[in-house]
Amino acid sequence: MVWSLDLIVVALSVVLTAWVFSIYLKRALDVRSSFAKGLALLSALFFVQSLVSVVVYYRFSGVYSVDVALPLFVIATLDLGGFAVLFWIARQ
């Protein structure tokens, strides 16, 4: 059950980071400043990290117990909160 929650939270992170990446990429192409390009690159790295997390969590779910799932759930939830703040900033 906890692994399912982990996967849901990480999947939400993938969606949110993809959305943030699309916002920053559009700004980088419009503004063409090094700062905007840096934000696009940073958000792309967050997106890749989220994708890797989905794969790792899925693989871990078949091997490890709730003793591993619970701390990873806390970490994934904090990540999602951070990405939500980044999304909120990007939308302004």
Image: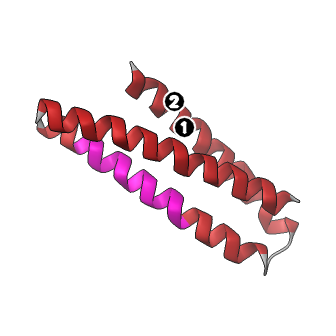
The answer to whether 41 appears left or right of 62 in the picture is left
What is the number of the mark on residue 13? Answer: none
The answer, for residue 70, to whether it is visible in the render is: no
Q: Residue at x 27, y 41 (%)?
A: 25
Q: Residue at x 37, y 55 (%)?
A: 45
**Residue 7 at what x, y percent from top left?**
71, 58
Q: Tag 1, which secondary structure?
A: helix
Q: Tag 2, which secondary structure?
A: helix
**Residue 87 at what x, y percent from top left?**
47, 31
In three-dimensional space, the C-alpha distance between marks 1 and 2, rounded to whole angstroms, equals 5 Å
Which quadrant does the N terminus fall into?
bottom right
The answer to whether 45 appears left or right of 71 in the picture is left
The answer to whether 79 appears left or right of 61 in the picture is left
Q: For residue 23: magenta?
A: no
* Secondary structure mainly formed by the magenta segment: helix
When asked about the image quadrant of residue 78, the answer is top right
Q: For residue 49: magenta?
A: yes
* Front position in the image: 92 or 85: 92
As drawn, 48 above or below 74: below
**Residue 2 at what x, y percent from top left?**
84, 58
Query: In the rendered structure, which amino acid carries the disc numbered 2?
Result: Val
As drawn, 35 above or below 2: above
Q: Residue at x 28, y 44 (%)?
A: 40
The answer to whether 36 appears left or right of 87 in the picture is left
* Front position in the image: 88 or 67: 88
- Callout 1: few (<14), some (14-19), or many (20+) C-alpha neighbours within 10 Å? few
Magenta residues, as a range?
38-52
Pointer 1 residue: 82
Pointer 2 residue: 85
- Callout 2: few (<14), some (14-19), or many (20+) C-alpha neighbours within 10 Å? few
**Residue 61 at what x, y percent from top left?**
77, 72
